[in-house]
Amino acid sequence: MRLIFAEDYEDMSCEAAKIVSGQIYLKPQSVLGLATGSTPVGLYDRLVQLYQTVGLDFSGVTTFNLDEYVGMSSENPESYHYFMKKHLFSRVNLRPDHCFVPNGMAEDLEEEGRRYDAMIEAAGGIDLQVLGIGRNAHIGFNEPDIKFEAMTHEVRLDDETIRANARFFAREEDVPRYAISMGIRNIMLARRVLLLASGPEKAEAVYAAACGSVSPKAPASILQLHRDATIIVDAAAAARLPEAWKEKRFYNF
Ligand code: GLP
């Protein structure tokens, strides 16, 4: 695992954009795994800037998002699909037919999970998976006590996640209780993983991900076993990490 200690949210987003754009330059046909939430918005803004200023070319790129709320169509402004259109898909030259999000409206969610996994496989697998992290160390919507071997499947959201995500809805009662999410196994199968964390409310989760024992109680801790995982943390999110790790900008273990 590799850690990059960024100063703040801006710095974290810049470092992340370097890694994602580097991936696209090296392999124009890259398959990216993408995340929603407030954390990657700065990354997406910088990718849009690189598209506009230096012509970062997304025309060969395929994207697979991690998750979607059950019962939400892509036209619903609270859906993750809509979020992605707004923050990235509509702002760069990604081909619309190369951008995939699990279908939260599918009648048979088990079948939808299998279909999504098969599409990822047919695309050649994910080259670089971008992740945020929940306050309870969830990744995607893989909540504590998830089975590490799970592929894309329906999940029930934790109360803590529902409270945290209520800020995107008019009322807490409006937050869907179920989602469809790539599983931990999908994430572990990605060739590279890039987790972003910003702000003091993520410090405990980052500690569990990087320093805690590998356990389904802290789903992000599995990344310690990934062959190529990078965590970019800002100073607030790094608060609980060992001071010795922070002496340089990069730390590998
Ligand atoms: C949601 C998403 C996760 C995301 C998390 C953190 O639960 N399913 O993929 O990492 O929120 O969101 P934020 O970045 O807004 O803190």
Image: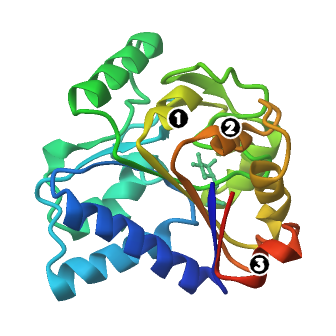
Of labels 2 and 1, earlier in sequence is 1
Of labels 3 and 2, earlier in sequence is 2
Viewer-side label of 3, 1: 3
Locate the C terminus by quadrant: bottom right
Left or right placement of residue 229 versus residue 177 in this view: left
Look at mark 1 in the image and give the residue it sits on: 188
Look at mark 3 in the image and give the residue it sits on: 246
Look at mark 2 in the image and give the residue it sits on: 222
Q: Position of residue 124 (x, y in %)?
A: 24, 33
Q: Please name whichever residue, 169 or 213, is drawn nearer the observer in this view of the structure.
A: 213
Q: Position of residue 207 (x, y in %)?
A: 82, 57
Residue 215 seen by the camera: yes
Tell me the amino acid under the disc marked 1: Met
Residue at 38 percent of width and 77 percent of height:
45
- Residue 123, above or below 88: above
- Residue 53, above or below 135: below
Label 3 CB less than 8 angstroms from ligand 1? no
Please rate how many residues cluster around mark 1, counting C-alpha atoms within 10 Å: few if below 14, some from 14 to 19, many from 20: many
